[in-house]
Image (spheres, coloured by chain):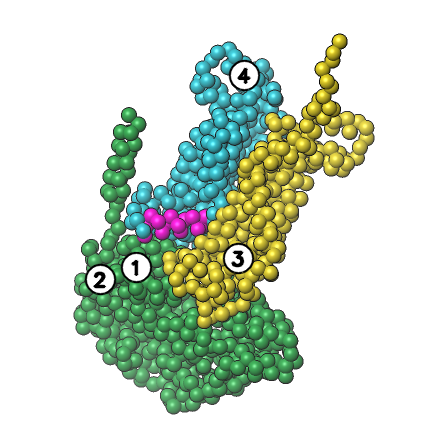
Chain colours: A yellow, B cyan, C green
Amino acid sequence: MEFPPIPPVEEILGPSPGQLLRRRIFTHKGLMIGGIILAVILFFALLAPVLSPQDPYAQSLTTRLSKPFWHAESTWKHPLGSDHVGRDYLSRLLYGARISLLIGFCVALISGVIGTALGIVAGYFGGRVDMVITFIITLRLSIPFVLVAVAVVGIVGGSLKVVVIVLGLLLWNRYAVVMRSATQQIRNQDYIPAAEAVGCSTTRILLSEIMPNIVNNLVVVATLEMANAILLEAALSFLGLGVQPPTPSWGLMVAEGKDFLFFEPWLITIPGVALFVLVLAINLLGDGVRDVTAPENR
Amino acid sequence: MKARPLARDRAFSQGSNRRGTGMLIYTLKRLALAVVVTLVVSALSFGLLYLSGDPAAAIGGEAATDADIANIRNIYGLDRPIYIQYLNWIGKALQGDFGMSYYFRLPVSQIMAARVPATLILGCSAIVFALIFSIPLGVMAAIRPNSWVDRTALFLSVMGQAMPSFWLGLMLIVVFSVWLPLLPPSGTEGWEYFVMPTIVLGYFAMPAIMRLTRAGMMEVLASDYIRTARAKGLLPGSILFKHALRNAVIPVVSVSAVQFGFMLGGSIVIETVFAIQGMGYLAWESIKRSDFPTVQAVILVFAVIYIVLTLLADLLNGWLDPRIRVT
Amino acid sequence: MSRKFSLFWMIVLFALILTASPAGAGKANDTLNILHEIELSSVDNYFNTDRWGVVLCHLLWDSLLYRDLKTGEYKPNLATSWKFVDSKTMEFDLRQGVNFHNGDEFDADDVVYTLNWVSDPKNGVKTQNNVNWIEKCEKLGKYKVRLKTKRNFPAAAEYIAGVMAIYPHKYYAKVGPEGMATKPVGTGPYKGVEVVPGKSITLAKNENYFAAGPKGKPSIGKLHIRFISEVNTQIAELMSGRADWIWRVPQDQAEKMAKMPKITVETADTMRVFFLHFDAANKKGRNSPVNKLKVRQAIGHAIDKATIQKTLVKGASRIIHSACYPSQFGCTDDVVKYEYDPAKAKKLLAEAGYPNGFEIDFYGWRNRPEMEAVMGYLNTVGIKAKIQYLTYAAVREKIRVGEVDMAHNNWGSFSIHDASAFTGNFFGGTTDDNARDPDVIKWLEIADTSVDPEVRKKNYSSALQRVAEQAYCIPLWSSNMNYAYTKDLNFSAQPDEIPRFFNSSWK
């Protein structure tokens, strides 16, 4: 009697979850594009001091409003032109990547912590706790965020720290809502009551049982909120409440460039395109993570 | 595959009577909550406003002396403790008297009444614009997930949201008012004045609504119920439009309400760019000039609108899906 | 079917666009579309503090006198002659045959009522400085009035000519400021047609305006004023032909717009002087480097005013060395001047005890690029200035309570051509005075109230010299103003920032 050759173990078992995940990530076009763009921007941000032709804060009134290299009357001192007080745009673009990424990341961190904590607690405990937290969320959504920004800036003045704190303290609502509903969904899965029966402390349940299972939701919301924060910083700068000059944030550069829209359009277009690409990349990444980790695909 | 019985079926099994009283209690609870939220919001805003500037100095104007300002403080009652001022204000506000604007010296209600129409028109057209484009896009994307249709739809919707709104607005003005003199850059005299602002404002609600429609549709389409209907041989078209969409639309309703609320706030930038004298612009300018009565009134109105919308959305959700009423 | 369908909708769309309400295009329907960026709080002349209020004051109303721009003399307007009876009393003969827009006859009752009403602090006129010098106005006859001032006030004629609109007494008594704000009535060359508060003001030519007046008869039929706060939108409106006149155009944009075929760009100096305002007197006891004279002098030397003026401010602006505007009576340039000398600045800083510079909050509320330029220069001598860009009201308040070490301040003097409106305001012991120099206060007191022009000039001179020596403030430059309007318009800009539309006409 002849038996067919026994295939190796890996073939019988099939690819491991880790391998599956990796495969899904690498075949998802959106995720890859977003990830690569983000990596490139990160690279430029980290190497800004090396790559910038000049100090982004250095003024040079005599060469103000120089045109970028694709114009005839440009100068190589300012490859991407210069702004209204003569600061080099390429340098500001590179350093601006740092600030924009920093804002996005820090705000996502702060609001993520607040929102996730509130959301998980609300979802897990339910009842009165949930009511209180939902109340707080509705409250937060009903307060005009401009008013808070104005009040804070009015007292302590505008600056990078202030922008990050204000945005961080205001943008946690989506985290809370999503994490709350995600927690609710898995609340009654077998392993939670099991952990409770065994006598795990609440903290342990929240951190070790619930968190890992909803972390993919968190990542998705975090990426979207990062993009949101970066754009809101531009809106705040438009209203005069954001980062103050001479700090080179892309949002501030777009807001400042607005005044030169008609005749020196590169001042708003260059940082605008940069912002656009960054936000797009983050969105693609977020969508990709969601697609790749969505329960339907498991 | 998740098995989720349709909302209606469960409601029926509970009996319509219970549904009636359950609904009433739910409505009352939500209403009470709405009122409390409104009051707290207005109180918080009151406090924040005081932190942001000195109203007496703002009323006094450019050349007011210290004596002038002290005098003003006395006349307007600004030297009394904050909570007393707030209670006075809310008392009158509940009777419809929002006081006099510090800046315009006209009744705030009169000023707001003149500005409300523009913002409402803008907000409504924007949400309609968003819905008209996002829902079909979301449906198409859901039918063929991960296809180029899906990717393009997502990309299109995200595109407008990846630009600061004032930039998008200004670009539209440059293209459609200066290069091609088709549309007016500012004002509200006719329907054509609202085209560009609607596009800019509506664009921001689009990604959320589209994604939600797509996700909702995909989930429903994959449910057992739909599979059964398909197996029974019902035509794909009728499945889609009668059953799937109706179920998928539930979260879209509440998100639209929420987006509408956001847009009222986001309209500040757009109203400024397009010089639409609406509530958002009024709020912003009033904050800048410390015109407290006006700011309070506008915030209260915004909060009320937002809370009413969320309340309606909640109620609608509760009616459609009774499980929600229990939480 | 779908092809015809979409063609149909294209046609509909085009038809709608073409028939959409046309803009009131300038010359074609004799309407000048004017844009201004700040919503006016009230059309009532005494209840707004914006520049546009002054503009409307001259459009809708008349004053007793009118300042001739070329000669600087006060010409008769609603008053045909006037004289100082003694140092505190003036008498006016009034013009006969003048009517208000609503048909009421103008006579002494109107003058008496208006001046007494606005000078009563109970009525809450916004800019008390403009009216609180009036003691009482009495009727001497149907066309004769006597005006008493509270103290010697040599600048009375200037204030009367500049900001004192005369109201119809019956109408104002009936409707008050609220009524006047929505339905203004005056004697001026333009009458109110429609006021939408905070949004637009429409005026029409007053056909019955008295031709014998110094303003002459108005030519343009209608003025439609709209408020648009976003500069780019204003420019878009002008470029697309929907607006005919805008001002305060930023320098760079103005230069480029000048090259456009349908637009005229005019540039004029203004009386608005920008200066660095220091807390020299340590008002609140916060102890700041700027309390020291050498630090202030260092700052004066650190800034290259000439380059900033040439590259950023440009136009018809000029460098100002003294705390007043050159055209103001009593102003003199014969003071210590701080030349650009960064080495000297660093030396002074070291002598004052700051060899490595220091950090300071730099407050401002207008022309941020100029603030940034100044900040850049301060940086090179070691002074790290952090910009705090707030609203006017916020900054002014902080300055007054002594919380601001250094501010990028500016003052237009309400276009009053008298040094009392500038120097007197900032160094005469008022709430805006952050120097508190008793000598300066004394000199200004004498100069503001003496009727002898020579005495006034001498004391203003002493005060200005002391201010410059002590660098209580560092004057920078006067602000340049750019006007952009359609080529169809005859208009000429004046340095007092008051566009005179009654002197404009179509080409």
Q: Chain of mark 3?
A: A
Above or below residue B4? Residue C55 is below
Q: Of helix, strand and loop, which one carries label 3?
A: helix
CA distance for labels 1 and 4: 65 Å
- Same chain for mark 1 and mark 4? The answer is no
The structure residue drawn at horizontal position 59% and vertical position 80%, both measured from the top left corner, is C346
Are the residues flagged by discs 2 and 1 in contact, CB closer than 8 Å? Answer: no
CA distance for labels 2 and 3: 43 Å
- Same chain for mark 3 and mark 4? The answer is no
Residue A23 on image: x %, y %: 63, 33
- Same chain for mark 2 and mark 1? The answer is yes
Q: Of helix, strand and loop, which one carries label 1?
A: strand
Q: Of helix, strand and loop, which one carries label 4?
A: helix
- Same chain for mark 2 and mark 3? The answer is no
For label 3, the residue is A93
For label 1, the residue is C34
The structure residue drawn at horizontal position 27% and vertical position 42%, both measured from the top left corner, is C17
User: Looking at the rendering, in which quadrant would you find the N terminus of chain C?
Assistant: top left
Indicate the amino acid at tag 2. Asp
Q: Is C97 on the left or on the right of B160, as rendered? A: left
The residue most toward the right is A199
